[in-house]
Amino acid sequence: QTVVTQEPSFSVSPGGTVTLTCGLSSGSVSTSYYPSWYQQTPGQAPRTLIYNTNTRSSGVPDRFSGSILGNKAALTITGAQADDESDYYCVVYLGSGFWVFGGGTKLTVL
Amino acid sequence: QLQLQESGPGLVKPSETLSLTCTVSGGSISSVPYYGGWIRQPPGRGLEWIGSIYYGGSTYYNPSLKSRVTISVDTSKNQFSLKLTSVTAADTAVYFCARGSGASGHLDYWGQGTLVTVSS
């Protein structure tokens, strides 16, 4: 069974840069998995930030960017702001209607 | 603008069946190449994909839930539905419906979510 791995937590200073990663328990995350990233604040539905590895969803600030770093997908936040403090989820698409979620990363901005 | 809305009972008794419906407005559920998906989130925990359905009726389930899950679609009502049998307290969660794109591989529209509590 495919398991998607993420850092459980991360912290960044206001104005700083942070990179969250998304890996597979076995194998590498590549563009073929169409990795996407979602931001979720308490009590809200997830919001799409990045899809298809590096495409920003409509309305998402350009301080959010997606990439492949080595064998993982990555979400980089450049110039972190206080309201970026959220949970971030990576999702990979296995094709034919199958999606797998990572466990999520709790980002603290302090 | 596409909108999705979950509906169904907020309280289900242990061993019974959880039933939810997702109503899609502002667009057709039969659009290609999109899937209707269900995702859940237990209190204080992460998101878990439950399964998805293509408008033609093909279904795809999380292997860990497959034996208890049925997802169906009613294109005439622009709805898709989730049934989860033999529920326990571990099935208490916020349940989200979402549209998944088979082209870009992401979940592009989400419902607001509905809390289902399993308790006697």
Image (cartoon, coloured by chain):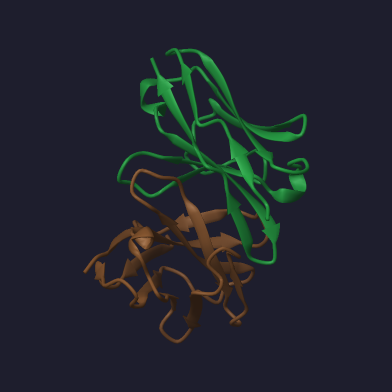
Chain colours: A green, B brown
> Which one is nearer the viewer's eye here, A68 or B118?
B118
Q: Quadrant of the C terminus of chain B?
A: bottom left
Vertical order, A96 against A63 (above or below): below
> Which one is nearer the viewer's eye here, A44 or A5?
A5
Vertical order, B26 against B39 (above or below): below
Q: Is residue B17 left or right of residue A39?
A: left
Residue A76's x, y, as percent?
59, 26
Residue A64's x, y, as percent?
55, 29
| Residue at the (50%, 13%) spot, across then down | A16
> Which one is nearer the viewer's eye here, A3 or B54?
A3
Residue B18's x, y, as percent?
35, 74
Which image quarter: residue B63? bottom right
View extreme (bottom): residue: B76
Q: Is residue B89 left or right of residue A9?
A: left
Which image quarter: residue B23? bottom left
| Residue at the (54%, 66%) spot, across then down | B51
Which image quarter: residue B17? bottom left
| Residue at the (76%, 42%) spot, across then down | A30
Q: Quadrant of the N terminus of chain B?
A: bottom left
Q: Is residue B16 left or right of residue A98?
A: left
* Number of numbered callouts drawn: 0
Vertical order, B3 against B72 (above or below): above
| Residue at the (49%, 81%) spot, across then down | B73
Residue B7's x, y, as percent?
30, 70
View extreme (left): residue: B120
Q: Is residue B93 left or right of residue A1?
A: left
